[in-house]
Image (tube, coloured by chain):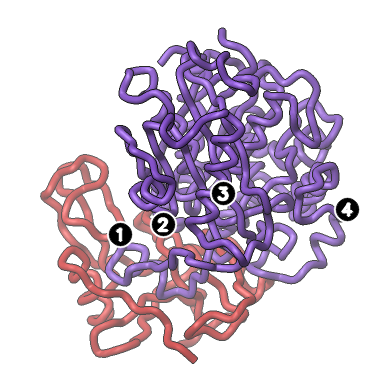
Amino acid sequence: MAERPLPAITPETRHFWEGTRAGELRLQRCVACAHVYFPPRPFCPQCASQEVTAFRASGRGKLYSYVIHHRPTPGFTPPYAIAIVELDEGPRMMTNIVESPQTPEALQLDMALEVVFERMTDEITLPMFKPTGAPK
Amino acid sequence: MKPGDVAIVGAAETTKLGVIPDMSNIQLHADAALNAMRDAGLKPADIDGIACAGEIPTNVAHYLGLVPKWVDGTAVGGCSFMLHVRHACAAISSGMCNAVLITHGESGKSRVGAIPRTILPASLQGQFEAPYGIMGPPTMFPIPVLRYMKTYGVTIEQIAMVAVVQREWAAKNPRAMMKDPITVSDVLSSRLIAYPFRLLMCCLVTDGGGALILTSADRAKDFPQRPVYILGTGESVETPMISQMEDFTSSRAFRVAGKQAFDSAGIQHSDVDHLMIYDAFAHLPIYGLEDLGFVPRGEGAAFIAARNTAPGGPLPLNTNGGGLSYTHTGMYGMFALQESVRQVRGSAPAQVKDVQVAVCHGVGGMFASSGTVVMADRRP
């Protein structure tokens, strides 16, 4: 089976992937307008300020929406959920849900999720999410 | 451009539609272009503007033997052709060129000479979506649907009705790929693709193409076909990542493009006799009806389920059968435009009576982009 596609890190996203490798989910905040945003960029997409900082997010959020894919996909065993988590800090990101059956019954919108880090290679660790309180 | 200053004077699809293994991607562009030139009574030497997506304009212009002095390669997915119409109107009305050819051709099913679809691993989508198992539009386009359903209390049965109603329109169209009637139960028992969506809520995958020719309305009466006047247009883009849509229950690009089109055309919703909304998946006409302002937010599904857009209903929608039942090569927007032109000309297989104003609304990518065109049977 072919492998799951992995990111190619760019200068603008390096802090994010260094963060996941260190067990941190890093978001960015604009110093000028306080906007918290994702995906990474070295400027604020709301006010264009180039004074931005990266910070460690809580890693908590809720299940915002998802599909459960039923067709063959390289690196995956269907059915599997492709999910959107809305982080407590505001931004949304795509993810997979681990430590949970991949069923509509188990995956209820707005359920609480928390980040876990799945090491793929020496360079890449992907952030994924599990139901809050689920054993890891 | 003032409303009606530019007109469509040539329009045609490829001679064959559906499965065309004996034509490559670029030949599908050419087949449609030759048919459109015949429709307009024009030769390649009469065309001085070219716009296309999928193939770059250089390829199509060279292949057809054109000498363009205006070129548009805007490629923002399946609604690129709506944007080409808008750009061509600006170019023609400002005197940059006289006759613009817009082409689409795609070997979406047979993949003969087809352009590979790739997500670059260093792009934002490659870094932040591709690792989570996205595999083509069916894994991405329906992602907002559960949030929409929960927000507005919409049921999967109501969404399934979109496919049922469009099949009724397709049944009237000899060129539609799928013509047999279907029920909500058929839709909900078809194969699961990406929960909550099943096979019959997803578009077809076909080969085909289409082409349009636009020129100044002052010349439009000299052509063999009844001119279709452009009243107004709109366009926008939002995000290449479905995960980053501002609002999962509404498309910003739809709202921006739609408002521009209605405002520039100077029309009200009650003026619209016929509507096309690009339906790559069953929820798109629902989002489209709401984001274009035909119904309040959250009421699109019930509006369709109540047969308002079905044959005999007050707002005929996707009367060719749509991407769900007519054809869907990959960039379906050209086929939506072709059906709008046929309806305004009065030559559609499922002809709606007395279409004076038609709205054609397109999407590109996964709610990534949008283009809207308002057409009319007369110059205001």
Residue B241 - label: 2
Residue B378: name its quadrant: top right
Chain name for mark 3: B
Q: Are marks 1 and 2 in contact (CB under 8 Å)?
A: yes
Give the percent coordinates (x, y) of residue B342.
69, 31
Q: Which residue is mark 3?
A: B31
Separation (CA) of disc 1 from disc 2: 10 Å
A105 relative position to B88: left or right: right
Label 4 in the same subunit as label 3:
yes
Q: Residues within 10 Å of mark 3 (few under 14, many from 20)?
A: many
| Colour in which chain A is drawn | red
Tell me the mark number nearer the camera, choosing from 1 and 2.
2
SS class of the residue under badge 4? Answer: loop
Q: How crowded is the residue under tag 1: few (<14 C-alpha within 10 Å), some, or many (20+)?
A: some
Specify which label sits upstream in the sequence, 4 or 2. 4
Task: From the viewer's side, name the closer residue of A27 and B293.
Answer: B293
At horizontal 61% and vertical 49% (from top left) the residue drawn is B148
The purple chain is B
Q: Amino acid at mark 2?
A: Met
Spatial CA distance of label 4 from label 2 is 35 Å
